[in-house]
Amino acid sequence: MIIGSHVSFGEKQLLGSLEEAISYNANALMFYTGAPQNTIRKPISDKLLDDAINYAKENNFDFNNIVCHAPYIINLANKSQADKWDFSINFLINEIKRCEKLGVNKIVLHPGSSVGITQEEGLDNIIEALKIILENDTSVNILLETMAGKGNECGRTIDQIAYIINNVNSNLLKVCVDTCHINDAGYNVNEFDQYLEEFDQKIGIDKIYCIHLNDSKNILGSHKDRHENIGFGEIGFEALYKVLTNKKLENIPKILETPYLAVTDKIKKAPYKEEIAMLRKGTFDKDVFKDILNI
């Protein structure tokens, strides 16, 4: 079972990310190389990277189970302002270079939002941008994330993801399936085998390189994108556990992006250690957060 969560990338960079993940008894992780809402990035420290590599070896943590996430400020779908579109392309290229430096071969990308234009135009802009980005020699795979369809989001259907992948035609373009997002987009996670069957016909299951394992606060097809803790949302524990243990996906990392728990008005704690333990056990526990919340 390859399972982990979103973790921080702070002063200790990837070393800190690994330490946090291992404290959750995880064997996979996902991080941003800086704040996802801005462009501030610190140089990758060679010393900290060496320490991270050694720490991973000591703990048998496979670098193939480390995933980077591109920042939200990147929008490849909207070309109406050429400078902003060029910025998104160049910023993603730089993020990919940071992944190369870190030895990380997967970066998850929100395809983009077609504000002020049609979805078809947005998809074509994404294709054009990805062709430019993938002209660069790299070993890093770009994982298009399945989206909930909130607002003008592109990538809300299997057909849209397939359209991008088929037209870019690069071996480095893969997919990250988010269970909350596909639920909110209208795909029933309780019928995940049917989803995979359609995905395989139109894209190929071998293109799935990561799963974001999240419950949803929203009903099927709501197009809202609000994550919930495992088993406490509209998808439910049983359906998510079946995704986690699906034999066709057993060799790819599953990443939790569930909400932090509000202990007080000012203090929030990560739920990941408890959720991972519950998922490893395979049984839903409605009191799983009892110790955190002191109830």
Image (spheres, rainbow, N blue to C red):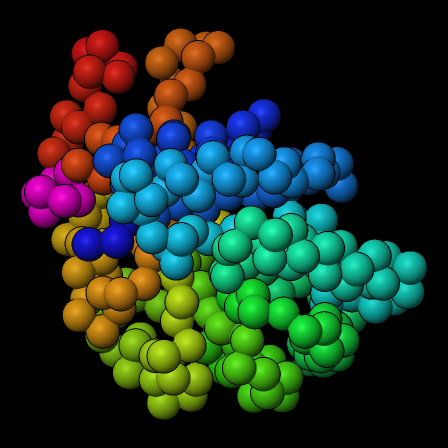
Q: Residue at x 59, y 87 (%)?
A: 169
Q: Residue at x 25, y 78 (%)?
A: 194
The boundaries of the magenta stretch are 278-284
204, 141: nearer the viewer: 141
Q: Is the C terminus in the top left, top right, bottom left or bottom right quadrant? A: top left
Which image quadrant for residue 35?
A: top right
- In the image, residue 140 sits, relative to residue 33, either above or below, namely below
Residue 151, position in %: x, y? 63, 57
Across and down, in percent, residue 181 comes to: 44, 57
The magenta stretch spans residue 181: no
Residue drawn at point x = 27 percent, y = 46 percent: 60
Q: Is residue 281 magenta?
A: yes
Q: Is residue 209 left or right of residue 25?
A: right
* Residue at the image position 91 percent from the left and 65 percent from the top: 82
In the rendered image, residue 6, in percent from the top left (x then y), is placed at 43, 41
Residue 54 appears in the picture as rendered: yes
**Left or right side of 152 for 148:** left
